[in-house]
Image (cartoon, rainbow, N blue to C red):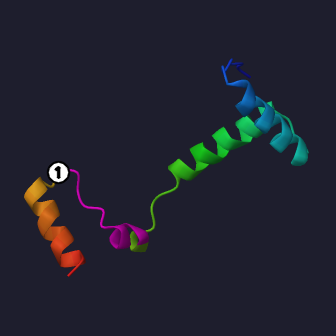
């Protein structure tokens, strides 16, 4: 396991300590869980219905294509 040091303002650290304590964990365990959850979330594929609903288009699309797509979507 690796270790990192994160400089935080005292106010933020005090908040995190209180929050973690109320959750029955430590600040370190809280950060580890958040990092793991983020990694797992980002590794999941976007559901096709969500992709269509959010208006995601190909990265290769140019600005004009994007405008036309948005106009159709919001018409």
Tell whether 50 sits left or right of 28: left
Residue at numbered disc 1: 60
Q: Tell me the quarter of the picture where residue 46 sits.
A: bottom left
Looking at the image, can residue 38 be seen? yes
User: Which quarter of the rendering shows the C terminus?
Assistant: bottom left
Residue 55 located within the stretch drawn in magenta: yes
User: In this picture, is 46 found above or below 12?
Assistant: below
Report the residue at 36% width, 73% height from top: 53
Report the residue at 64% width, 39% height from top: 35
Tell whether 71 sits left or right of 53: left
User: In this picture, is 27 found above or below 66?
Assistant: above
Measured from the top left, where is residue 22 in percent x and y? 89, 47
Report the residue at 74% width, 25% height from top: 10
User: In this picture, is 5 found above or below 46?
Assistant: above
**Label 1's element?**
loop
Report the residue at 23% width, 76% height from top: 73
Residue 11 located within the stretch drawn in magenta: no
> Which is nearer the eye, 25 or 51?
25
Looking at the image, can residue 29 be seen? no
Look at the image and give the residue range highlighted in magenta. 50-59
Q: Tell me the quarter of the picture where residue 51 sits.
A: bottom left
Q: Residue furthest left?
A: 64
Measured from the top left, where is residue 63 in percent x and y? 12, 55
Measured from the top left, where is residue 64 in percent x and y? 8, 59
> Which is nearer the eye, 46 or 11?
11
Measured from the top left, where is residue 14 in percent x and y? 80, 32
């Amino acid at each position: 396991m690796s270790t990192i040091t994160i400089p935080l303002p005292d106010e933020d650290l005090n908040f995190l300590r209180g929050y973690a304590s109320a959750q029955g964990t430590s600040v370190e365990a809280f950060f580890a869980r958040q990092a793991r959850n983020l990694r797992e979330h980002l590794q999941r594929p976007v559901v096709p219905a969500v992709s269509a609903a959010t208006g995601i288009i190909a990265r290769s699309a140019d600005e004009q294509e994007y405008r036309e797509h948005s106009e159709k979507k919001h018409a």
